[in-house]
Image (cartoon, rainbow, N blue to C red):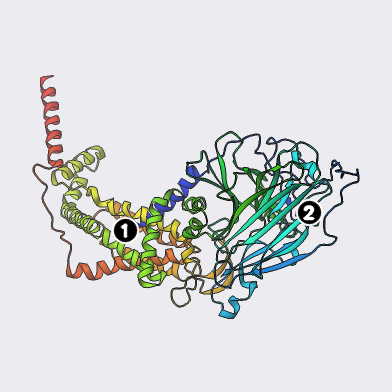
Amino acid sequence: MDKRLLIALPLCFLILFGWQYLFGKKPEPRPTPAAGQAAAVDGATGNAPTSSIAGERGAAPTDSNAPVAAETAKDAAGNDLARVADTEVREEVLEVGKPGQPGCYRAVFTNKGAGLVELRNGAYVDRAGYSPAEMEDWRHWVPIAGNTSSVAKDRPLSFALRTQPNSDHLRRASLEEELWQMKVLETDGVRSGIEFTLAPGTGVTFTKRFRFLPGKNQLVLELELANDALATQSGVRTFDLTPSAWMVADSGDSYYIEPQAVAGWREKPAADVECNSIPRDPSGGELAGVLASAPPGSGSEIAYVGVHSKYFTLLLAPAKDGPKSLVGAGWRKVRDNVVAAKDPEHAYTQIVADTQVELALPRQGERTKLVFDVYAGPKEPDALAAASADFASLHRYDLGWVRVISAPLLSLLKLFHWLCSSWGVSIILLTLLVRLILFPVNRRSQTAMARYTAKMKRLQPKIEELKKRYESDPSKLRTEQARLMQQEGAFPPLGGCLPMFLQIPVFIGLYKALGISFDLRQEPFMGWIHDLSLPDQLVAIDLHLWPFGLIPYLNILPPIMVALWIWQQKMMPAPADEQAARMQKMMMFMPLMMGVFLYNYAAGLSLYMITQSGLAIIEMKVIRKYWPIDDKDVPPKKDGFFAKMIALQEQAEAQKRARGRAR
């Protein structure tokens, strides 16, 4: 590693952020009449005043909460059908599985709207450092959806169901406001799920059933529609379903915007799943939009819909052996009135994904059912792929366009972790491997640069003499100086920048990989470093520093990284010309700039850069001492490239002089 790396690192950031800015726009799904726009959800009521995806984009919305003049169903004697519903609001807390193991959940259900108030995954805790007893306390489990805090009681429910214009006649009031009958399901005497039932008095019965799968971060959702006495013509009816509402962002990473609404779709059954994700924007802006669409007859299909944070996600997909019932997906922002009271300009703290579900209204006396697979767990690639091959596209989406580099680097990290059982040591071993692979290229580049520097020192007196001789003729000075360089072959080596360009992809790949890798979450390394996925956070300081704003923690690794970069730069040999000397002075500010950029980034990346600089210093101090670089001044080859260029130039000048004499 030489001083050119100090140019390479800022260039890495310019390439990374510039590419994301110019080309990072996500693929826009095809707009269709079945995919439209939503309105934001008011956090005070938790109700969605408009459909998220039904109707023409920009068309007048329908109020899914307004009562409708439903057709009154009659029995055989002509009497109105009785309603089957509860009389008061109830909640049911269901805990399944064993803490610390996949399949452990704490779910809070409510019969008002037949949805999830909160879902926590007991296989993971919200921060590192808990005792075994504390890890069994559900209050420390990771919240996947919802929030049971006192200010969140009226926020939207996960798995809320809403009717659309062609299904409005099946309800009397909003399905989110109805009090469904609730029953706990048991398997072999163990509580394993919840069933909700509602007969709104329109001749149909709705059933919503949740079943948790033992040992898996998954559950099954079943939607049933029974036609008890409705004589109207059967056919497909459309509903809106919200898989996840109010996902808590707990990563503490300011570089990753969370939560995000996401949908995966494929253009045809055999095609790969494409992914589209929309991050929240608390400042407002556009309040709703389209994630994906799959209109009937198009050949495309919606693979999954959900919401995800940096490390966790809740995704809903049609069952593998069931019909492809999702025909559209949209996103809408959620306004938090509690936040709005303090900061109205940044009140849209949440984003929600809705999906359009087609459920057939059966003939009288029959029922239809849709089954959905729900994944509520970590965004770990193996876990996603185990739940569904389609879900793996979310991890590929997070890696972005650098996944061809990031994915192999993550595989190498896992291999080293298998060998040493420490992710911090794995990062150090990966850095060492990169240095070893690039060592021959670095050595050759350093040798070429050393010889060039020696040659420039030998030619410096001649250059000074030319400056004095042609002081009043800059054009002639440049010509003669170029001639001298050509004659002596004093040109910077063509491969001098090769190591820098080889290290740029590695740095960018690690920058992305370490920033989203679930493997590094809550993984300690040494001393005060308790989480390699976050800054090292030595001590809380809550310092307001202009122009950086609030600095919550004192991080030690970035200053160590900057100090090593500066030390490494000072060990570089003195430049042979004034221009290079000025450049070296300018480069002294680059480590400081990089330290500011990486101050709040993952400690794993700082550990990588510290190891890189430390190995470079060891190379200059130790390896070069016992294996010096050959910096002898080698004369230019008589049959080399530059010799041929000189010969061609001299031939052209001779012809020019001959033409002059002829004139």
Q: Is residue 53 left or right of residue 15?
A: right
Q: Residue 588: tell me if it is visible.
A: no
Q: Position of residue 399 (x, y in %)?
A: 46, 53
Most foreground residue, 180 or 313:
180
Using the image, tell me which numbered label, if any, was put on residue 198: 2
Using the image, tell me which numbered label, if any, was put on residue 3: 1
Q: Position of residue 368 (x, y in %)?
A: 69, 46
Measured along the vertical axis of the image, is residue 623 above or below residue 439?
below
Give the amino acid at mark 2: Leu
Please tell me which of labels 1 and 2 falls first in the chain: 1
Q: Quadrant of residue 233?
A: top right
Q: Residue at x 77, y 41 (%)?
A: 62
Q: Residue at x 51, y 41 (%)?
A: 269
Q: Residue at x 15, y 41 (%)?
A: 641
Q: Residue 428: tell me if it is visible.
A: yes
The residue carrying pointer 1 sits among few (fewer than 14), some (14 to 19) or many (20 or more) residues within 10 Å by Cα, namely many
Give the amino acid at mark 1: Lys
Measured along the vertical axis of the image, is residue 660 above or below residue 599?
above
Using the image, tell me which numbered label, if any, was put on residue 432: none
Q: Is residue 487 left or right of residue 596?
A: left
Secondary element type, mark 2: strand
- For this orientation, the residue located farthest to the left is 638
Q: Residue at x 17, y 67 (%)?
A: 627
Most foreground residue, 533 or 315:
315
Measured along the vertical axis of the image, is residue 485 above or below residue 179?
above
Q: Position of residue 344 (x, y in %)?
A: 72, 54
Most foreground residue, 436 or 213:
213
The residue carrying pointer 2 sits among few (fewer than 14), some (14 to 19) or many (20 or more) residues within 10 Å by Cα, namely many
